[in-house]
Image (cartoon, rainbow, N blue to C red):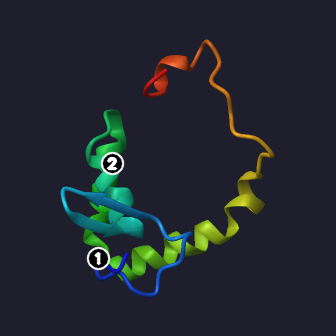
Amino acid sequence: MAKYGVDGMTEETFLLIKQGKCHVRTNAALEITKGLSGAWCLFNIFRIVPAPLRDCVYCFIARHRYRWFGCREQCMTPTSDNHQRFVGL
């Protein structure tokens, strides 16, 4: 994190290092959607919203996600139906 000048982040901060550039929080998430197929690229419309505002909403959702969506004790194991969606399997 020091190499990229990212201060004040914790181990829970969402970071993406891509082609030598560090993307943080919503910028990282939006950068990932660029490489996904389907409608995911449509999320890049949110780049018009200032990053501090996007990050505020992102942090709010992150704080409440387990209450809203639940939490699992174990990671999901791919079934034969969704096996092809995982890289390297």
Which residue is at 69% across, 68% downward?
Answer: 64
**Image quadrant in which the N terminus is located:** bottom left
Which residue is at 33% across, 50% downward?
Answer: 32
Relative horizontal placement of residue 57, taking residue 33 as reference (left or right): right
| Distance between the alpha carbons at the discs numbered 1 and 2 | 25 Å
Which residue is at 61% across, 12% downward?
Answer: 80
Mark 1 element type: loop
Front residue (pair 51, 31): 31
Front residue (pair 36, 19): 19
Which percent across, then down, holds residue 68? 73, 58
Mark 1 Cα within 10 Å, few/some/many (few <14, many 20+)?
few
Which residue is at 46% across, 87% downward?
Answer: 8
Residue underneath mark 1: 3
Residue underneath mark 2: 33
Mark 2 element type: helix
Q: Amino acid at mark 1?
A: Lys
